[in-house]
Image (tube, helix red, strand yellow):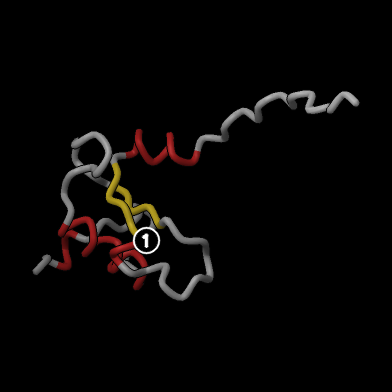
Amino acid sequence: MSNTRQWRAKPRTSKPNSRQKRNGLFLDAHPDCQVCGCPSIEAHHTLAKGHPLRFEWLYMLALCQRCHVEIHRPRPVPKAVNMAVSK
């Protein structure tokens, strides 16, 4: 079990909220980034906000900051391919 003094609360908060506690428990159970193996510091939710299973650990990833930024980085849209069909 995790020590409540070790919650990964944002520095501007004095008392962690339930989301920070839940993510802290998940990160305590998964100390390494699930992509590169570095120490994990952020919990990534693979389901959209509002999804009823969003906070299930099955649908979360423990990530380092670099991998989390990479997941959220916008990808360039490929140029449209001319799909005209000749008759």
Figure quadrant of residue 27: bottom left
The x and y percentages for residue 59 are 35, 61
Q: Give x and y (percent) for residue 13.
A: 37, 61
Q: Secondary structure at mark 1?
A: loop
Residue 68, quarter of the rendered image: top left
Q: Name the residue at 15% across, 59% down.
A: 29
Q: Vertical placement of 83 versus 54: above or below?
A: above
View extreme (right): residue: 87
Identify the amino acid type marked 1.
Answer: Thr
To which residue does mark 1 refer?
13
- Residue 82 horizontal/vertical position (percent): 79, 24
Q: Is residue 6 left or right of residue 21?
A: left
Q: Residue at x 17, y 68 (%)?
A: 4
Please name whichever residue, 17 or 84, is drawn nearer the observer in this view of the structure: 84
Q: Residue furthest bottom?
A: 52
Q: Quadrant of the N terminus?
A: bottom left
Q: Indicate the quadrant where residue 87 lies.
A: top right
Estimate how packed mark 1 is, as few (under 14), some (14 to 19) or many (20 or more) residues with alpha carbons within 10 Å.
few
From the viewer's perspective, is residue 79 above or below residue 3?
above
> Which residue is nearer to you in this view: 83 or 67?
83
Horizontal and vertical percent position of residue 74: 57, 35
> As displayed, is residue 36 above or below residue 44?
above
Which residue is at the far front? Answer: 87
In the image, what residue occupies the spot 30% across and 44% down? 63
Give the total number of marks visible in the rendering: 1
